[in-house]
Structures are given as C-alpha cells and as structure tokens.
Image (cartoon, grey):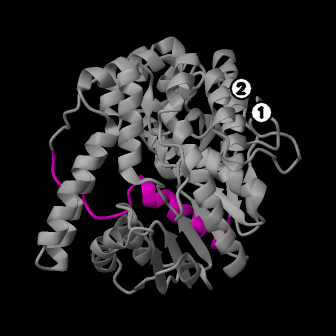
Amino acid sequence: MKVALLGGGGLRAPLLAGALAESGLGVEELALYDKGPARLAAIAPVVEASAPGIRVSVSRTPDAAVRESRFVFAAIRAGGQEARAHDERVCTEAGVLGQETVGAAGAALAMRNIPAMLRLARVVERESPDATLINYTNPAGMVTEALLNETSLEVVGICDTPAELADRVVALLYLDPDAVSVGWSGINHLGWLTALHEADPTGVFPPENRLENLFGDRDRLLRVHRDGLFETSEMAGAIPSEYVFLHLHPDRAMERTRASGTTRGASILDLEATLFAALAAARNPEEARAGYREFTHARDASYFQIEARGDASRPDGAPAADGPSGYDRIGLQAMGALLGDEPETMVVNTRNRSPAGGPAVPELPADDVVEVAALVGKDGVAPIPQPPLPVPAGDLLRRAKAAERELVRAALAGNPGIAAEGLREHPAGGPKAAQVFDRLRTVAEEV
C-alpha cells in the first residue's frame, strides 16, 4: 500500500513515518512532497531512517506523490513559520490575540491554507479519487470544512488536542485507557470533553460516565490544566481544551504573550533554525535522528507555555523517546480504523450529521463541520450524538462557528473583507482584531 504525505518537509514527518513503519498496516511506500525542496532534502533522510521496511520516495510534484496512494496525509503551512511568526508578532504588538489558529492570526492562516489545500485536494481528486485524505493542516476544522464542501473526496480532519486532554483526565481518575470511550463536542480548537464512559466488565450495567467523578473534586479538577488557566466554574459539566481559554480570555492570553517577550511562532522559528543546522552537521542518519529527537522534545515542552503563563522558558528533561506521539498516533488510529473490520471510537473533524440524520453536536446544524466523537470504520465516519454543552459553552461555540463560516467563505472567495467582518464577530477577535487583520500575511501561496 502506498501512502503520501503532502508537506513532507514538515518537522512532524519522521514521527508519522515511524508510526507507519510500526503499524503493521502493510504500508510499502511513503511518498513525500513539499513546496520547499531544501527542507525536504534535509528532513527526508531522517524520515527514511525512521521508517525501516518502508520505501521512502521524494516526489517533485504533488501529482506523482499522490498517484496510486490509498491514503494522503496533508500537513502544509503556506507561507511557512515566517508568516506565522510575522502574524503573531503584529497582533501582539497591536494588543490583540496573536495565536496561530485563533483570532486574527488564525483568520490569516485560513486565508493562506484553505486555497492552498484546495489546490492540492484537486490533485488528489484527479490522481487518486478513491484515496482518503487525512488532514492535519490548520486551522484543521475550517480546512476540512472547505475540502468536504468543495471536493468529492473522503476527508477526515485530525487534531491531537482531544486525545491528549482525554489521556490527562484518564490518568487523573486512575482509569484504564483501554476500557473507556471518549465523549467530545465542539469545533477544532474549541472543544470540550463531555464523557469518559467506562464499560461494566460484567456487561450487566450500562457504561458509566466516570467524568462525573471529577466535577465534585475541586483539587483534582484544577490539576487538569496548568495553574490558573480556568476557574472551576468554567469546567462545570464539561472539561474545556486549552484553546477554549483563548476564546474566553483573549486579552489575558495576549498580555501573557506580550509579557513573555516572544511568540510561539518566533520560538518555533528559532528551534527550526537550530534543527536544520544540526541536520546539516550530522555525519550519519543516527546523528540526524538524535538532533531531531532533541528538537521534538523542545517543541513539545514549549506547547502552550507562552499563552498560558507568559513564560517563554521550557522545562528541562530527557529527549523525547521514539514511538507514536499524539500527532502521529491519531492519524495512525484513523487509518487503521478505516481499514479495519471493527469501527473505533475516536475524535475527528467531520460533518455534524449523525447516522440518524440529526446533528451530533446539538448546538450546530448538521451540515457544519465539527470536532466530535465518532465511530470510524471501513464504511466511513459516523458522528456519535453528544449531550448539550453547558449553556455558556454552547453560546461560545455558536458565536465562534458563525464567524468560522464567514472565514471559510472568505478564503474560498479570496476576499479579505469578508474575513475581517467574520473576525469582528469572533469571540477571540473583535473590532480591534479586524482592524489589524489587513496588516497580516493573508495572500494564499502556490504549493
């Protein structure tokens, strides 16, 4: 089986390659394509060293990469980290939230990535119309919505945030991760953990929602997230992901970013420069892989540190171990479920229509793309109906999704004016963010 990775010069490519090599799913070839040939040339040896038993090929065109592929993973970044760092810096200097996928910077990213991904999806549609496109490209929910609306492809949007939050809560409650199924409701980067259903081993009683045990335990509830991120009242009835903080408290997140003296994008840009210098100096593939592991550890350790704490420092620790992380684990799970005989429950970005025809996320219309717990199997993706969110969360979700619809429409039309109006109504945006928007890098690039 052939698998393609669009954005193969991205720095998560070796993680995905390693997971595919260990998956037992019969992957024989991994074809890489990236707009940046220098990045691809630097990272391809690490990808190859990470995937014993798989033939790693480098394609000059997306057409060659996706041709005859059963799965196409997409993880592109039009404009690169430079555009991200620029947008986040401009936003922070102007006193508005600057975060890659949320607020003004998120709107600019949508304007760049949606048209670029649509061009690549058209190539997949032409060269491998039966392939499943697994989308990592941010803003993952909006990109997935555009591709589902504008192409005939089977598209599944992936994000590791739900799984990482669920894993954290499972550990806090001392549950067996293999014995629980996750309830999740929302949209990408604005989602809530709604349930952790633990099956009765005897089969006599229905599954019990163990998440309810957490709501009466204030001390343990406050340990779910970093200190001071949420009040207990903001976690009543459903556990928000970190990104909900950006929607509830954009000014606070902006001030913490400003206090740090940098942005996440600038931090990653510096880390990338260090990595590529290490790759250039590496004398053999093992040295290159060691440098890569140090980079991934530093990158992962800095996740959400700046926005949450105003502290650009990173905790020290040993280099990250080999093996699936959240990023590649979720993609691999989706791929295995789509090939397997038994459906698996997982959280994906997909159409909000449950098998019965109604919306799975009850706050939003069935035709919207949402991030929701779903049964994923060889017959496709079947969203699982979720309970209503707490009223404040549901209101926040409706506001954000209304703005997202306008951002998707703006990106497809290439109209920044529509995006600015949508951003004006976004809970993490507002009039000031809309004014800053025309200074950001919103032009879609060829990929």
Q: Position of residue 37 (x, y in %)?
A: 37, 73
Q: Is residue 395 magenta?
A: no
- Crowding around mark 2 (Cα neighbors within 10 Å: few <14, some 14 to 19, many 20+) is some
Q: Nearer the viewer, residue 92 or 16?
A: 92
Q: Residues under labels 1 and 2: Cα distance?
A: 7 Å
Residue 351 is left or right of residue 177, and the answer is right
Residue 148 is left or right of residue 183, and the answer is right
The numbered disc on residue 398 is 2
For the point 29% across and 41% down, the residue is 266
For the point 43% across and 69% down, the residue is 8
Residue 256 position by quadrant: top left
Is 181 placed above or below 305 here?
below
Question: Magenta segment, which residues?
Answer: 317-342
Is 360 placed above or below 76 here?
above
Is label 1 in a helix, a strand or a loop?
A: loop
Counting every numbered tag in the picture gives 2
For the point 47% across and 24% down, the residue is 245
Q: Is residue 332 magenta?
A: yes
Q: Nearer the viewer, residue 191 or 431?
A: 431
Can I make out residue 135 in this image?
Answer: yes
Say which residue label 1 marks: 364
Is label 2 in a helix, a strand or a loop?
A: helix
- Looking at the picture, which amino acid does disc 1 mark? Leu
Quadrant of the drawing holding the N terminus:
bottom right
Q: Nearer the viewer, residue 135 or 192?
A: 135
Q: Which residue in the rendered view is the most extreme toward the right?
A: 357
- Crowding around mark 1 (Cα neighbors within 10 Å: few <14, some 14 to 19, many 20+) is many
- Looking at the picture, which amino acid does disc 2 mark? Arg
Can I make out residue 180 in this image?
Answer: no
Q: Position of residue 171 (x, y in %)?
A: 40, 39
